Image (cartoon, rainbow, N blue to C red):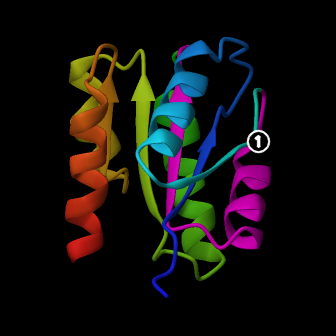
């Protein structure tokens, strides 16, 4: 029996708006993935602990508050420190286009901005699984 792909969807920082994250979590679940949604106002440390405890393959971070350049890379850094750099991190939300190269440089594998079709996200996940 093949292992179910597990994805953690998390909202780091003080951002209290989770409509988009909940939509993505539901859409990924509907696409056949096992999804764990941690809710709002998570610290990078708590996200990493949960990701490791839940043995996830991916962490999807969602942010609207503008703190993505600090919080998204912190999650990647902490995963590396915990020898969990095999967990693939992607992000989304209100992310200015000019910030995307910085985030990718810091280890965020993909960034999906508002309005991204769910198919684009599932295609990314499937391609990463092939590697």
Residue 67 visible (yes or no) = no
Q: Is residue 62 magenta?
A: yes
126 vs 4: above or below? above
126 vs 10: above or below? below
Q: Residue at x 76, y 41 (%)?
A: 43
Q: Is residue 50 left or right of residue 103?
A: right
Question: Where does the image place residue 62, in percent across and percent down from the top left?
Answer: 53, 30
State the residue in front, 44 or 89. Answer: 89
The residue that mark 1 highlights is 43
Helix, strand or loop under label 1: loop
113 vs 123: above or below? above
Q: Is residue 118 left or right of residue 87?
A: left
Residue 112 visible (yes or no) = yes
Question: Where does the image place residue 48, in percent across and percent down from the top left?
Answer: 69, 60
Q: Is residue 5 magenta?
A: no
Q: Can you tell which quarter of the image residue 40 is in?
A: top right
Question: Where does the image place residue 94, in percent across and percent down from the top left?
Answer: 42, 15
Q: Is residue 69 left or right of residue 22?
A: left
Question: Callout 1: few (<14), some (14-19), or many (20+) C-alpha neighbours within 10 Å?
Answer: some
Return the residue found at the far front.
1
Q: Residue at x 53, y 15 (%)?
A: 64
Q: Residue at x 22, y 22 (%)?
A: 98
Q: Can you tell which quarter of the image residue 82 is in?
A: bottom right
106 vs 41: above or below? below
Question: Where does the image place residue 115, in percent across and percent down from the top left?
Answer: 29, 14
Q: Residue at x 65, y 18 (%)?
A: 18
Q: Quadrant of the C terminus?
A: bottom left
- In this picture, which residue range is highlighted in magenta? 41-65
């Amino acid at each position: 029996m093949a292992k179910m792909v597990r994805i953690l969807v998390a909202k780091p920082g003080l951002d209290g708006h989770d409509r988009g994250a909940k939509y993505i979590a539901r859409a990924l679940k509907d696409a056949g993935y096992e999804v764990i949604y941690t809710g709002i106002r998570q610290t990078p440390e708590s996200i990493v602990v949960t990701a490791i405890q839940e043995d996830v393959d991916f962490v999807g971070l969602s942010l609207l508050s503008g703190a993505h350049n600090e919080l998204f890379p912190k999650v990647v850094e902490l995963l590396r420190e915990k020898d969990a750099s095999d967990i693939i991190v992607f992000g989304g939300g209100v992310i200015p286009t000019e910030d995307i190269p910085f985030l990718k440089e810091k280890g965020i594998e993909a960034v999906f901005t508002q309005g991204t079709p769910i198919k684009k996200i599932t295609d990314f996940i499937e391609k990463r699984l092939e590697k």
